[in-house]
Amino acid sequence: MAFSALFLSPRVSVPKFSPSHLPNPKPHHLAFSIRCSSSSSSSSAAAASFDLRSYWTGLISEIEAELEAAIPVRYPEWIYEAMRHAVLSGGAKRASPVMCVAACELLGAPRAAAFPTAAALEMAHAASLVHDDLPCMDAAPLRRGRPSTPALFGVSTAVLAGDALFPLGFAHVIARTPPALVPRPALLRVLAEIARAVGSTGMAAGQFLDLSGAAAGGEAEVLLVLEKKFGEMAECSAVCGGLLGGADEDDAAALRRYGRAVGVLYQLVDDVLMEDEEGVGSNGRSPGKMRSNASAVRALGIDRALEIVEELKDKAKSELRRFDDKCGERVLPLYSFVDYAVHRGFLVAGAGAGAGGNEV
């Protein structure tokens, strides 16, 4: 079923804003502020004063330590060096791990329960980017302002490094998740969620549909590609964090819908920024260097793209309202992610980040 049928309301009149109302995709380190919709709940409104930048950057050092421990250099060293380059070379936002930790903490669980899975999500994300950069895909010489893994290590090593990162992430979840914090049945569900997200009905499907030109069919097709390419990882991050924190079925379903909406929202705003900034989105790459057909702006026009931005923002926040009373301030990071996806009020960069853009 197409994404629009699942998440978007029928076409309605919503307040429009032009691309100039979106911030520059590479702002300086500005004081954090966000704008909330008038229909926001009290928790959503309170997110305006939540310091997401400090929360996010504070988690990055812990996530980097987890990733360092997860990918030591072993024999054969060249493959491990390629894997480390893909994951640890700097410039990444670590958005998937941060969302996973925030969803785990939402339910009152300690973040230690989420760190191994957060690292596995980042490894899966990095592996997908390695494969995206291959000559048969996007043929990208740069990633985050540095040589891409295929450009630096060669195509064959890059394929192997990407392939190796997926199972390494699974092994890390099993070996490092504290059994006293996460029951084994929940851990099995987490592994199944990651496998689904990266597999033939998830991100792999999205890349195939994008390369095959499926997005040329219209709004439903464009949104389906965006859902599969970008919504799947955010959905997986949110629901995995919830499962690690002890979410019941209804809470997990709400987090699933929330994450998917945020993932597509972020990419839609990137499309708008690319249009507004003459081809450079928040990831610092020109669409002319990528074989991506799923641009909502090109397919649907700027006005409709901005309408969908508003719809997805409202959808994501509505899924969080069930947590307002029972979770209190612990829900604020997740509300703030929604506003960050739209307004990009600050720059997040991983340890060792240099020039160049970041992707979510």
Image (spheres, rainbow, N blue to C red):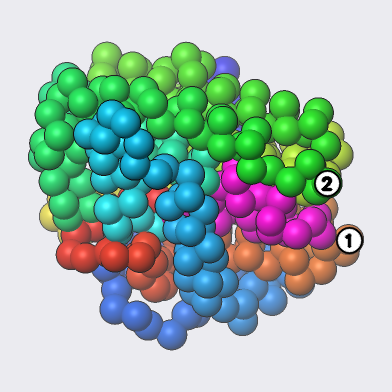
Question: Is residue 293 or residue 284 the one in the foreground?
Answer: 284
Q: From what the image shows, is residue 353 above or below residue 34?
A: above
| 320 over 191 or under it: above or below | below
**CA gap, disc 2 and disc 1:** 24 Å
Q: Amino acid at mark 2?
A: Ala
Q: Is residue 177 left or right of residue 203?
A: right
Q: Between residues 109 and 174, which one lies in front from this camera angle?
A: 174
Most extreme residue toward the bottom is 31
As drawn, the label of residue 326 is 1
**Residue at the (45%, 34%) spot, across then down:** 124
> Which quadrant of the figure has residue 26?
bottom left
Residue at horizontal 83%, vertical 37%? 183
Quick one: label 2, few (<14), some, or many (20+) residues within 10 Å? few
Q: Secondary structure at mark 2?
A: loop
In the drawing, does residue 163 fall left or right of residue 227? left
Which quadrant of the figure has residue 193?
top right
First along the sequence among labels 2 and 1: 2
> Residue 77 at what x, y percent from top left?
26, 35
Determine the main secondary structure of the stretch shown in magenta: helix
Dot 1 amino acid type: Lys
Residue extent of the magenta highlight:
94-118
Disc 2 vs disc 1: which is toward the camera? 2
| Residue at 41% across, 31% down | 165
Relative horizontal placement of residue 76, taking residue 181 as reference (left or right):
left
Q: Quadrant of residue 217?
A: top left
Vertically, is 155 above or below 55? above
Secondary structure of residue under mark 1: helix
Q: Which residue is mark 2?
A: 180
